Image (tube, rainbow, N blue to C red):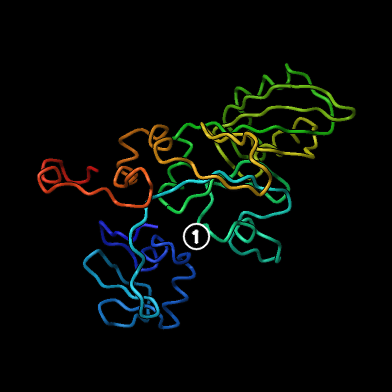
Amino acid sequence: MAATLDEPVRIAKALARAGLCSRREAERWIGEGRVSVNGEVLASPARDVSAMDRILVDGNPLPAAEPPRLWRYHKPKGLVTTHADPQGRATVFDALPEHLPRVVSVGRLDFNSEGLLLLTNDGKLARHLELPATGWTRRYRVRAHGSITQAALDKLKDGIELSGVRYGSIEATLDKPQGANVWLTVGLREGKNREVRKILESLNLSVNRLIRISFGPFQLLDLEPGGVEPVKRRVLIEQLGRRVASELRLAEFDEDETKPRRKSPAKAASKPKGWA
């Protein structure tokens, strides 16, 4: 994860941005005296740092800058999307291959849900992809106990309010009945907690299988449960657009996704500050 600090940030955020730990873990490390800035061992996380500061953790400098990256992951049932579960349940991050760097998830899938989960080594990219304003549809295949008509599902296009919570427009298609169950395809642009389950429960449907099949332009396809595949950098740039890709530093790295792109002094000087 990139360790570049274009603007002053809190030290815990700097360590998290570098991919070493979460902000909470960083604060604990500081309390343990493991972090120093410019030779001073920190006793409190109330410290801003920038690229001009020399930051050491356990005597080692922060990692060199790496490109923001994105992976498709097929989450199986029976895993929680958190780095540490108070109930001691297995987590998505426990199950990932060892060769992956420290990553965060783009949104979540609950314990009993499965399917496509996007992972990234860059918190800023994760936050951008999670925003409802990004406008990307999350699409699910759903099996639910009960019966319903397409006409009833069509009413969800206007959104629905449940227990004081307003849910936006939902696309829902009745695919086929299967015994006492129905199969549906559901699409939504938000990502509120257990949204699909709660909305279908309001229609007297009990969800017994929930599979996310796409998140915006990224598809689950034939990725096996537990499988992880990287999204090519050029594909990510195409989907985000050049302006956003530049803000997220995606254009700063060569196509092999490992080496920063070198710019001649003349070219670097010719572009306004903040451009890739």
At which x and y percent is residue 272? 15, 42
**Residue at the (63%, 40%) spot, across then down:** 223
**Residue at the (40%, 80%) spot, across then down:** 58
Q: Quadrant of residue 33?
A: bottom left
Query: The residue under label 1 is which amino acid type?
Result: Arg
Q: Quadrant of residue 172?
A: top right
Q: Is residue 228 left or right of residue 122?
A: right
Q: Is 147 drawn above or below residue 194 in the view shown? A: above
Pick the residue in front: 244 or 268: 268
At which x and y percent is residue 107? 55, 46
Q: Is 54 drawn above or below residue 215 in the view shown? A: below
At which x and y percent is residue 219? 58, 34
At which x and y percent is residue 231? 48, 41
Q: Is residue 64 left or right of residue 265?
A: right
Q: Quadrant of residue 30?
A: bottom left
* Mark 1 Cα-neighbour bin, 10 Å: few <14, some 14–19, many ≥20: some
Q: Quadrant of the N terminus?
A: bottom left
**Residue at the (45%, 65%) spot, across then down:** 23
What residue is shown with label 1? 102
